[in-house]
């Protein structure tokens, strides 16, 4: 089966959508340009077109959450649940009782961690795509195409859970308390603002100003995605130290920057593990299919 017609139709539809879409102009221009490249070169660069397609679909779904987010107003936002789990499992003794790890870190910051965690957290998507591209194009592993489709599956599951059970991030609880959710609360870069102030930039504030959802903390897709990359690195026996180090830094950054509880990360890891296991299982079934088919007769 050729995927080229599908890629062309999806690309043309995406380009048309971008023309009438709302949202940050730079976001639309960049994604529209990438989609145009895919459409125009998919015959010559079929491997690239197939590699990029899941990523484009994921970004499109992410962008559309700004349309779906108002529907959250009809659902109960879980403000205290993740924090209660965090205190029960990872509570840290403090002067006025136990605090969560994100709360503890906000009074134990350092410029070095601000820079390291900020760069790591901002680059989580780039790191994943570069790892996947290395396996697919540098090592020429055709089976590495599933890495990008796994990324899409992880995010679709995560976005669905965010919509069905919206949860408040730790920065929201520190700013607004544990009462009924303030549904009009704007997105916040939280600890990322220290990074911006330290370097004199607006990377975090600019990115999170355009965030499509405030109440999508659990599961953490930052952590889940980098954990997924580490699992594939282990399977491929390639870039394992780099992938696992990257995952560890993103996990630390998600908590240090006050964006996620540890339990958010664990939930993201659990979903990533399920996606990885499903992909491995389906891949093995596909490889065995020819051998298990009926024997040919003369």
Image: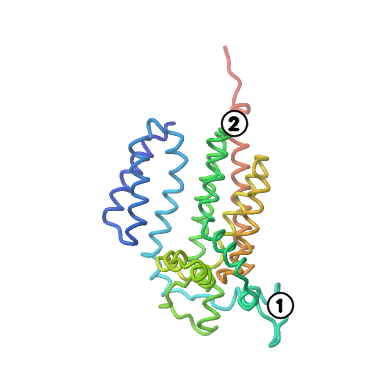
Residue at 63% from the left image edge and 59% from the top image edge: 249
* Left or right: 175, with 20 as reference point: right
State the separation of the CA atoms marked 1 and 2. Answer: 52 Å
The residue indicated by pointer 1 is 92
Residue at 36% from the left image edge and 64% from the top image edge: 67
Of the pair 83 and 206, the residue shown nearer to us: 206
Asked where in the image residue 82 lies, by quadrant, the reply is: bottom right
* Crowd around label 2: few <14 · some 14–19 · many ≥20 (10 Å): few
Residue at 63% from the left image edge and 58% from the top image edge: 269
* Left or right: 113, with 46 as reference point: right
The location of residue 54, given as percent across then percent down, is: 46, 46
Residue 173 vs 54, above or below: the answer is: below
The location of residue 223, given as percent across then percent down, is: 59, 59
User: Which secondary structure lies at badge 2?
Assistant: helix
Image quadrant holding the N terminus, namely: top left
The location of residue 242, given as percent across then percent down, is: 64, 48
Dot 1 or dot 2, earlier in sequence: 1
Image quadrant holding the C terminus, namely: top right
The residue indicated by pointer 2 is 289
Q: Residue furthest right?
A: 93
Residue 198 vs 275, above or below: the answer is: below
Residue 246 vs 205, above or below: the answer is: above
Depth-wise, is mark 1 or mark 2 nearer the camera?
Answer: 1
Asked where in the image residue 234 lies, by quadrant, the reply is: top right
* Left or right: 87, with 211 as reference point: right
Residue 55 vs 288, above or below: the answer is: below
* Left or right: 291, with 165 as reference point: right
- Colour scheme of the rendered structure: rainbow
Residue at 33% from the left image edge and 62% from the top image edge: 23
């Amino acid at each position: 089966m050729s995927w080229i017609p599908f890629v062309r139709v999806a690309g043309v539809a995406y380009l048309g959508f971008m023309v009438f879409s709302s949202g940050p102009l730079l976001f639309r221009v960049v994604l529209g340009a990438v989609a145009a490249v895919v459409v125009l070169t998919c015959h010559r660069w079929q491997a690239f077109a197939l590699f990029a397609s899941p990523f484009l679909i994921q970004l499109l779904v992410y962008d559309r959450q700004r349309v779906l987010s108002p529907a959250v107003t009809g659902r109960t936002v879980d403000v205290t649940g993740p924090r209660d789990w965090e205190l029960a499992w990872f509570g840290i003794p403090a002067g006025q009782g136990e605090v969560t790890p994100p709360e503890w870190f906000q009074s134990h910051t350092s410029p070095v961690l601000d820079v390291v965690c900020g760069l790591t957290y901002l680059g989580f998507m780039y790191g994943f795509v570069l790892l996947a591209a290395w396996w697919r194009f540098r090592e020429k592993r055709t089976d590495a195409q599933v890495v990008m489709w796994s990324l899409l599956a992880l995010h679709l599951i995560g976005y669905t859970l965010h919509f069905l059970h919206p949860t408040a991030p730790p920065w929201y609880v520190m700013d607004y308390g544990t009462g009924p959710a303030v549904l009009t609360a704007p997105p916040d870069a939280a600890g990322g603002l220290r990074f911006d102030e330290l370097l004199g930039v607006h990377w975090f504030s600019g990115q999170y100003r355009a965030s499509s959802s405030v109440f999508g903390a659990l599961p953490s897709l930052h952590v889940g995605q980098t954990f997924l990359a580490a699992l594939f690195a282990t399977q491929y026996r390639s870039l394992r130290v780099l992938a696992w180090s990257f995952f560890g830094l993103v996990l630390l950054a998600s908590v240090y920057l006050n964006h996620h509880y540890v339990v958010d990360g664990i939930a993201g890891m659990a979903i990533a593990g399920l996606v990885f296991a499903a992909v491995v299982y389906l891949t093995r079934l596909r490889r065995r299919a020819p051998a298990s088919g009926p024997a040919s007769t003369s």
